[in-house]
Image (spheres, rainbow, N blue to C red):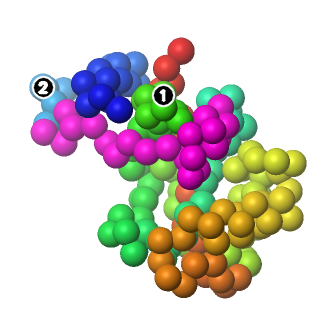
Amino acid sequence: MEHSALEAFWELARFHARLNSAPGYFGPTALETLPPPAWSFGAEPAQADELLALVLSGAKTATAGALWDYENDGDPVPEPGNLSILLDGAGHPRALIEATDVRVVPFDEVDAEHARLEGEGDGSLAHWRDAHERFFAAVATDERGFQPDMPVVLERFRVVYQEA
């Protein structure tokens, strides 16, 4: 992904989402001018495109990640209010999302509501567990891999801006 494309997207997203139009606004701070982290869902381009399409359609408003992988990779766990730029499978910025709720629960305690909000497959908890067990086992960066009681970061989000 070309860095200037990310910066151009960030400028458009900030404008359309009115991120710097609060009363008394006198100009951006350094943090407001830096783009938030940019990433894509899934482990391969086709999966990134498929999951992004669910986000853009409104069907996907949640995601899950292995806490052990966040820790192993040195990535911060998302917090409510965090912004992220979603990339498509080719690495192009397509949407700006905001985390609205984050909690950590054991994999085997993820509930049907969260599975439904992820918007994948038939939306059932059984589908979510099957797909995520396979995914976590295949892409784990932490040596513990998948465990039925492993801690999972459950994140809900809203789309703040999307490219037309």
Residue 98 appears anywhere in the view: no
Q: Residues within 10 Å of mark 2 (few under 14, many from 20)?
A: few
- Residue 109 horizontal/vertical position (percent): 72, 77
Position of 155 with respect to 59 (left or right) is left
- Asked whether disc 1 touches disc 2, contact meaning CB atoms under 8 Å apart, the reply is no
Q: Which residue is mark 1?
A: 94
Helix, strand or loop under label 1: strand
- Residue 67 horizontal/vertical position (percent): 50, 73
**Residue 124, image quadrant:** bottom right
Which amino acid lies under the numbered mark 1 shown in the image of this protein?
Arg
Which label is found at residue 26? Answer: 2
Whether 74 is among the magenta residues is no
The correct choice, above or below, for 18 with respect to 98 in the image is above
- Residue 129 horizontal/vertical position (percent): 77, 67
Of the pair 129 and 161, the residue shown nearer to us:
129
Of the two numbered discs 1 and 2 on the same chain, state the one appearing first in sequence. Answer: 2
Badge count: 2
- The quarter of the image holding the N terminus is top left
- Image point (40%, 19%), residue name: 16
**Residue 63, image quadrant:** bottom right
Position of 45 with respect to 36 (left or right) is right
Which residue range is magenta in the image? 30-53
